[in-house]
Amino acid sequence: MSKRKIYVLSRVPNLGHQLTDALKDDASVVEITAKFTTHGDEPTIKPEVVQMLQNAEILITDTDILKDVLYELPNMKWVQLTWAGVDRLLPHLDRSKPPPTYTITRAFCFGILMAEYVVAGIVNIERGLYSYYDLQKKKEWLHHGSLQFRTLSDLTVGILGAGVIGQEIASTLKRFGTAVHGLARRRRSLEELTRSSFDMIHSELSELLKNSDYIVNALPSTPNTTGMLNGEVLRNCQKKPVLINIGRGTIISEESIIEALKWSP
């Protein structure tokens, strides 16, 4: 029985070699090199590369590469993306064509990395470590630093996005005793909520904002999320929360950030 072939078409360095080492003899890795030709600023996939993919069933690729071959993979069964975002792919969906029949999965390995980033950010802010770092660079010693800080177990964190990354952040924060609320388009059943790490999952943004000490944006950039925090939405906040944005910046405009900082309840 021949080994299953996994095609790799990516700008990620050494991805094919790493995959070969990880899979050992379980599959055959075909890494496609010399992928692009350049006309102007935008690289274009070479026709011979597209031809190589005609019989491929499994492909690991980048989002901005998949957009160019989205409808040219007749035998594809599964595409694994190397990144979590979908904003570079969505504009290239052609509603006049049948959707691709293969499965597309995004990279979920970023969950623990984002969770660590969020925890580090909260601790740095609560303990005033940014200020201590500035003092350290100046070689100054603050003899009477404030001990009036909140621990993670004192806080309520609202996470915009209750998917894989949001769930990983929630799970990590719960280990420290943090109360964690999530925002999702779809209401969760009691059973789903019990299985998750969220204390509550809201479908209304205003409900999440008014209870949160920290707001973590983990949403992708889509037509539904762009500008979600614009205008006077942040006036629903009652606890002067800190916004930690690990998603896309399109969720809020610079003007709305400035207005929110000026406004005080």
Image (tube, rainbow, N blue to C red):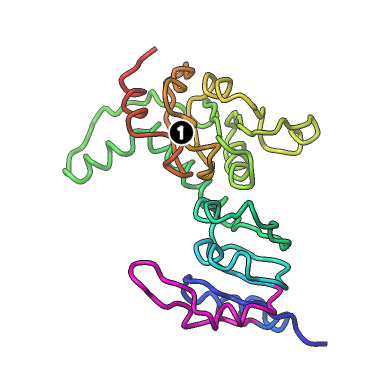
Residue type at mark 1 is Gly
> Position of 36 compared to 138: left or right?
right
Residue found 51% across the figure and 50% down from its top: 87
Percent coordinates x, y for residue 76 in the rendering: 70, 70
Quarter assignment of residue 59:
bottom right
What secondary structure is marked by label 1?
A: loop
59 and 53: which one is in front? 53
Up/down of 119 relative to 67, above or below: above
228 versus 245 height, above or below: above
Quadrant containing the N terminus is bottom right
Image height check: is 129 above or below 31?
above
Q: Nearer the viewer, residue 34 or 151?
A: 34
Describe residue 232's horizontal placement relative to residue 115 as left or right. left
> Looking at the image, which residue sits at the far right?
1
Q: Position of residue 102 (x, y in %)?
A: 72, 63
Label 1: how many residues lie within 10 Å, few (<14), some (14-19) or many (20+)? some
Q: Magenta span covers which residues?
A: 29-57
Q: Position of residue 176 (x, y in %)?
A: 57, 36
Residue 145: x, y in percent? Answer: 29, 29
Is 146 within the magenta? no
Horizontal arrangement in the rendering, residue 187 relative to residue 145 (left or right): right
